[in-house]
Image (tube, rainbow, N blue to C red):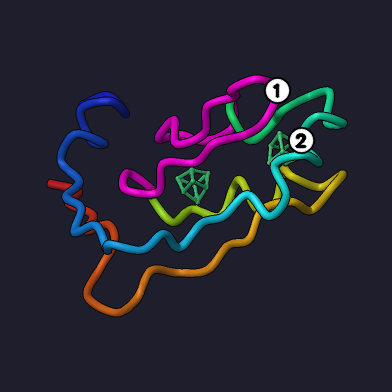
Amino acid sequence: MNVEDRLFLNRFNADDRSHLKVIDPEVCLKCKRKQCSPSCPSKCYTIQDGKAVVAYEGCLECGTCRIVCNEFFNIGWKYPRGGFGVSFKFG
Ligand code: SF4
Ligand code: SF4
């Protein structure tokens, strides 16, 4: 089973409030690499007009985006509230 097939098995119970936040989208304009977007395995980040936009619903809670935004520290990251977020199924 490849990675895409495994990811497809995951289930999400999305909260109505985001656990991820681009703290100041204006700061993204200074960020040349935009590394949040290619680094996210779930493709949660898109770049629009030079600013990162995050769609939290498909987040795998891996923490990669928080680590790679290491020039401007512009991502506010926390786990979803209890009962929400991803459920991993490795079968
Ligand atoms: S890596 Fe950080 S600063 Fe750069 S585009 Fe993404 S959120 Fe913005
Ligand atoms: S925690 Fe992982 S899956 Fe969630 S948005 Fe960040 S990089 Fe993507």
Identified at 52% across, 68% down, the residue is: 78
- In the image, residue 38 sits, relative to residue 9, either above or below, namely above
Residue drawn at (52%, 27%) of the image:
46
Asked if the residue under mark 2 is in contact with the one under mark 1, i.e. CB atoms within 8 Å, the reply is yes
User: Residue 51, percent across and down?
Assistant: 67, 30
Q: Residue at x 79, y 24 (%)?
A: 33
Tag 2: Cα neighbours inside 10 Å, few (<14), some, or many (≥20)? many
Q: Position of residue 17 (x, y in %)?
A: 36, 63
Which residues fall within the magenta stretch? 38-59
**Which corner quadrant of the image does residue 58 belong to?**
top left
- Location of the N terminus by quadrant is top left
| Tag 2: amino acid | Cys
Q: Nearer the viewer, residue 51 or 4?
A: 51
- Name the one closer to the observer, 16 or 4: 16
Assess disc 1: are there few (<14), some (14-19) or many (≥20) residues with their C-alpha within 10 Å of its C-alpha: some
- The residue beneath circle 1 is 50
Earlier-in-chain disc, 1 versus 2: 2
Mark 2 residue's CB less than 8 Å from ligand 1: yes
The outermost residue toward the bottom is 82
The residue carrying mark 2 is 28
- Whole-percent x, y for residue 65 in the image: 61, 46
Q: CA distance from mark 1 to mark 2?
A: 7 Å
Could you tell me which secondary element the residue under label 2 belongs to?
helix
Give the quadrant of residue 55: top left
**Residue 77: x, y in percent?**
58, 62
Residue 88 in the magenta stretch? The answer is no
Q: How many marks?
A: 2
Q: Give above or below for 44 relative to 57.
A: above
Q: Is residue 42 magenta?
A: yes
